[in-house]
Amino acid sequence: IQMTQSPSSLSASVGDRVTMTCRASQGISNFLAWYQQKPGKVPKLLVSAASTLQSGVPSRFSGSGSGTDFTLTISSLQPEDVATYYCQKYDSSPPGFTFGPGTKVDIK
Amino acid sequence: QVQLQESGPGLVKTSGTLSLTCTVSGDSISRYYWAWIRQSPGKGLEWIGYVYFGGSTYYNPSLKSRVAISVDTSMNQFSLTLASVTPADTAVYYCARGVPAFDIWGQGTLVTVSS
């Protein structure tokens, strides 16, 4: 199963609503996670099961989707959200943990 | 709290074998998935493989012929070996806990492959 993400990069203003997408080449139900990686830092799990926000993650982040198409939304972009965002599938058919290529977000 | 720490040589010679260990504290390695992920300079994340439920393993098909992951339950550690390395294997190597999404990561260790 291949994972694709779009766009590869985006630039938005503080306060903007930002949406990025992830597509699986085959259906993966909701076995989809989103990670945030700030420059020089360790990746951080934001969302699991496509839409379950991890504890401590700001509520401006939300995930949605099922099957092959998924979305991560930042409702009001903040300077600390500058990062690369990766999606990852983790279903068991086949049992791999493939990452998407990432979407780089910065401030306009 | 759960912590993971990678250890191993930071420099490996071309055609040699890369060996890293991840020490887990605050959780038992006999449950969940325990994975290795790498990130080449300026590139994205690539999962290498994982061990789960105390011993079963699964590897990224693109690396399968060169990779082995083992577990030492007595030490609460799991290890990665990657054979026949080339400069293309230069990367930051992370270990992580999978539940099954990777919720806890080590700090990562840079391994450089050079002649």
Image (tube, rainbow, N blue to C red):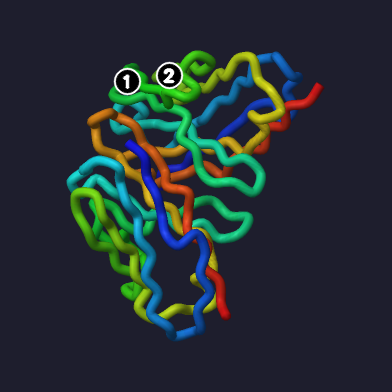
Q: Residue at x 30, y 33 (%)?
A: B32
- The amino acid on which the numbered mark 2 sits, given as a three-letter code, is Val
Q: Residue at x 39, y 49 (%)?
A: A4
- Left/right placement of residue A29 relative to residue B113 reads left
Residue lying farthest right? B115
Mark 2: few/some/many CA within 10 Å (<14, 14-19, 20+): many
- Left/right placement of residue A73 relative to residue B87 reads left
Q: Residue at x 34, y 70 (%)?
A: A73
- The chain letter for the residue carrying disc 1 is B
- Left/right placement of residue A47 relative to residue B14 reads left
Q: Residue at x 76, y 19 (%)?
A: B13
Mark 1: few/some/many CA within 10 Å (<14, 14-19, 20+): some
- The amino acid on which the numbered mark 1 sits, given as a three-letter code, is Gly
**Mark 2 = which residue?**
B71
x then y, percent, for residue A30: 20, 49
* Marker count (numbered): 2
Q: Nearer the viewer, residue A93 or B28?
A: A93
For marks 2 and 1, the one nearer the N-term is 1
Q: Is residue A87 above or below residue A13?
A: above
Label 2 SS = strand
Occupied quadrant, residue B107: top right
- The chain letter for the residue carrying disc 2 is B
Labels 2 & 1 near each other (Cβ < 8 A): yes
Q: Which mark is residue B54?
A: 1
Quarter of the picture containing the C terminus of chain B is top right
x then y, percent, for residue A28: 22, 43
Q: Nearer the viewer, residue A7 or B78?
A: A7
